[in-house]
């Protein structure tokens, strides 16, 4: 019933990423159900669900691809988001 979705971690660079002890051990994975994606930690604890194509869940339900993108972004390491944030700040500084 579940299909594993591989996370594209090839975008990691060699920047400093501070790792602290976490309550939910990494790596996190994304698995697909019939109408949802579930994000799990290394021990199998379910951390979140993202539903798609279920008319009962919302007025305008997410598409499968939208839900997959959200779930994959939830499972990414925090340092990826920090790198993107820093790159965005540097771009803005160059424009000014």
Image (spheres, helix red, strand yellow):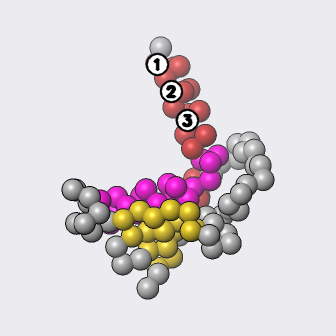
**Which comes before the other along the chain, label 1 or label 3?**
3
Tag 3: Cα neighbours inside 10 Å, few (<14), some, or many (≥20)? few
Residue 91 numbered mark, or none: 2
The residue wearing badge 1 is 95
* Residue drawn at 21 percent across, 56 percent down: 59
Q: Dot 1 lies on which element?
A: helix
Q: Quadrant of residue 86?
A: top right
**Which comes before the other along the chain, label 3 or label 2?**
3
The residues bearing labels 2 and 1 have C-alpha atoms spaced at a distance of: 6 Å
The residue wearing badge 3 is 85
**Cβ–Cβ under 8 Å for marks 2 and 1:** yes
Query: Does residue 96 sit above or below 22 in this rendering?
Result: above
Q: Is residue 63 magenta?
A: yes
Q: Dot 3 lies on which element?
A: helix
* Residue drawn at 37 percent across, 61 percent down: 67
Q: Position of residue 73 (x, y in %)?
A: 50, 54
């Amino acid at each position: 019933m579940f299909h594993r979705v591989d996370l594209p971690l090839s975008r990691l660079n060699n920047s400093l990423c501070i790792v602290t002890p976490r309550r939910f051990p990494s790596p996190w994975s994304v698995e697909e159900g019939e109408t949802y994606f579930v994000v799990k930690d290394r021990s199998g604890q379910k951390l979140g669900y993202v539903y798609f194509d279920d008319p009962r869940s919302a007025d305008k339900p997410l598409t499968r691809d939208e839900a997959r993108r959200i779930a994959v972004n939830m499972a990414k390491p925090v340092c990826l988001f920090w790198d993107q944030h820093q790159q965005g700040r540097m771009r803005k500084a160059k424009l000014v």
